[in-house]
Amino acid sequence: MILQSLNKKGIKMKKLITTVLLAAFVLSACGNNDVPSNTIVNAELTEREKTILSATTDQTFIFDFTTGSEFNELDVWIEKYEFGKLVDEPIGHIRTEIEENGSIFFTTNQSSVESNEAFFRLGISSNGSTGSSALSDIISNKDSEGMQTVWDTLN
């Protein structure tokens, strides 16, 4: 009698485990977004990540990328425009090896309004490794009366 009861519980447990594993497999397949190759999208951040970034940077832009297997390096640079004209050289550049996906981040901080110096951090993260570059640049205040700064990410 005890053996028969344990055997029935064992069969029920196997059915339960099989059902849970099957449901997990089906649900994980539904969550696969199948992002096309060579795509850059705005990163989805948690509230905690947003809070940390807002406390440590003035502006933050984070993107996720998917390249597929055809690329193994990624170059990212910052171009500077003054009064609508491109300055000759990029003010920042980073190149790193990547795998099929990862993230690109760009943050800014201003030291003070009086000095007009802005600090930037540019980075790439892929396959558990991250490369970053820190730099600064003077933001011109020539003819800046009434000038405003706005920012947003492009979708």
Image (spheres, grey):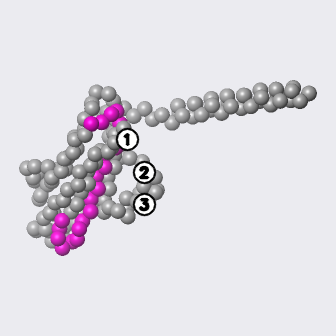
Task: Provide the secondary structure element on which disc 2 rests.
Answer: loop
Indicate whether 61 appears above or below 97. Answer: below
Task: Provide the secondary structure element on which disc 3 rests.
Answer: helix
Q: State the CA–CA distance, disc 1 to disc 2.
A: 18 Å
Residue sitting at the far bottom: 114
Between 58 and 119, the residue placed more toward the observer is 119
Q: Residue 144 falls in which quadrant of the image? A: bottom left
Residue at 37% x, 62% y is 54
**Residue type, mark 1 in image:** Gly
Q: Earlier in the sequence, mark 1 or mark 2?
A: 2
Dot 1 alpha-carbon crowd within 10 angstroms: few under 14, some 14 to 19, many 20 or more: few
Residue on which disc 1 sits: 128
Between 40 and 3, the residue placed more toward the observer is 3
Number of numbered discs overlaid on the protein picture: 3
Residue at 18% x, 59% y is 136
From the viewer's perspective, is 130 left or right of 8? left
Q: Earlier in the sequence, mark 1 or mark 3?
A: 3
Residue at 57% x, 30% y is 25
Write the start and end of the magenta stretch as one range.
Answer: 97-117
Residue on which disc 2 sits: 45
Q: Residue 18 falls in which quadrant of the image? A: top right
Dot 3 alpha-carbon crowd within 10 angstroms: few under 14, some 14 to 19, many 20 or more: few
Q: Provide residue 51's location: percent of width, then percent of height.
A: 42, 60
Q: Is label 2 in contact with label 3 (beta carbons under 8 Å)? A: no
